[in-house]
Amino acid sequence: IGSATTGGNWSTDFDMTWDNTLLKWTYTGTFLAGEFKFRLNHDWSQTNWGGSGGQASTSGGNIAVSAGTHTILLDPYDLTYSIN
């Protein structure tokens, strides 16, 4: 969710898919230039993660992303993410 999602607002979620081979959450899609965070079940009252430098945390800030098509991976075990 974030300003980098469709519509450029903080009310549109991109749903990630669990990859059983990588053991990570993944999403590939088109982003606007902006920021995003990961949140659980479309709900701010549950856990959400921001971060920087590929490290996610519940106290992390918004994650910047450039415009274009990206694959986002989130590892829930070591709380790392990548943007490709």
Image (cartoon, grey):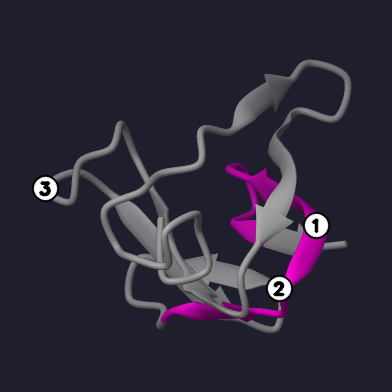
Return the residue at label 3.
45
Q: Earlier in the sequence, mark 1 or mark 2?
A: 2
The residue identified by callout 1 is 70
Cα distance, mark 1 to mark 3? 27 Å
Circle 1 crowding by C-alpha within 10 Å: few under 14, some 14–19, many from 20: some
In the picture, measured across the screen, residue 66 lies left or right of residue 36, that is: right
Mark 2–mark 3 Cα distance, whole angstroms, equals: 24 Å
The reply to whether the magenta stretch includes residue 63 is yes
Q: Position of residue 80 (x, y in %)?
A: 67, 60
Which residue corresponds to the image point at 71% horizontal and 54% vertical from the top-left?
30
Label 3: which secondary element: loop
Query: How many marks do you count on the picture?
Result: 3
Q: Is residue 61 left or right of residue 34?
A: left
Q: Quadrant of residue 41?
A: top left
Label of residue 54 in the image:
2
Residue range of the region highlighted in magenta in the rendering: 62-80
